[in-house]
Image (spheres, rainbow, N blue to C red):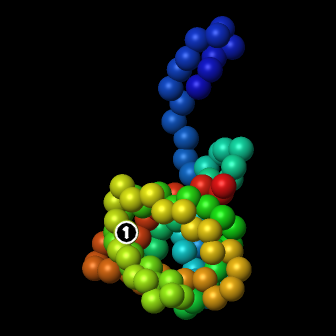
C-alpha cells in the first residue's frame, strides 16, 4: 500500500467469503469480492456441476485450482485447470454446462470485461 509519506508498506487483509448463488443453473459457491474497478470475484466450490447456463456477464475466468470440463451448445467440450485463462462470453441463450473433474476443489478468479 502507499503511505502518507509517499512510500510503500505491506498491509495484511482478509477477504470475506460467503456462500451464494452466482448465476442461474449454478450451485451455490463460496464467493469473496476483491477490491478492483472491475469487480473481481474469487470463487471456490468443493463440488461443481451446473445445469446449462449463460455467463452472468462477459468475464475472464482465471483457473487457480481444480479442473473443470465445459460443454458448449455446439457439442464442443474442453477441460480447464490451474493457469488456464478462459473468456466466458456466452451471456445469452442456453450458455454452457460446467462439470468438476477429479477431487480437487474448483477455485477461480472472475474478472468482468
Image x and y of residue 84, in percent: 39, 59
Instruction: Specify the quadrant that holds the N terminus.
Output: top right
Q: Is residue 15 left or right of residue 46?
A: right
**Residue 17 makes an appearance in the image:** no
Q: Is residue 47 above or below residue 112?
A: below
Q: Nearer the viewer, residue 22 or 84?
A: 84
Q: Which residue is mark 1?
A: 80
Which residue is at 66% across, 64% downward? 58
Instruction: Specify the quadrant that holds the C terminus.
Output: bottom right
In the figure, residue 20 lies in which quadrant?
bottom right
Which residue is at 65% across, 57% downward? 112
Image x and y of residue 100, in percent: 38, 80
Report the residue that reaches farthest toward the left.
102
Image x and y of residue 45, in percent: 46, 73
Q: Is residue 23 left or right of residue 66?
A: right
Report the residue that reaches farthest toward the top.
5
Image x and y of residue 34, in percent: 61, 50
Q: Is residue 80 above or below residue 11?
A: below
Say what secondary structure mark 1 lies in: strand
Amino acid at each position: 500500500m502507499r503511505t502518507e509519506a509517499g512510500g510503500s508498506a505491506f498491509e495484511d487483509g482478509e477477504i470475506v467469503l460467503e456462500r451464494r448463488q452466482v448465476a442461474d443453473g449454478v450451485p451455490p459457491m463460496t464467493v469473496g469480492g476483491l477490491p478492483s474497478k472491475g469487480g473481481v470475484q474469487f470463487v471456490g466450490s468443493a463440488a461443481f456441476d451446473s445445469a446449462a447456463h449463460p455467463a452472468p456477464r462477459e468475464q475472464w475466468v482465471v483457473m487457480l485450482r481444480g479442473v473443470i470440463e465445459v460443454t458448449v451448445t455446439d457439442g464442443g467440450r474442453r477441460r480447464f485447470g490451474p493457469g488456464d485463462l478462459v473468456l466466458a462470453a456466452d451471456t445469452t441463450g442456453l450458455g454452457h454446462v460446467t462439470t468438476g473433474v477429479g477431487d480437487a476443489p474448483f477455485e477461480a478468479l472472475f474478472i468482468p470485461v
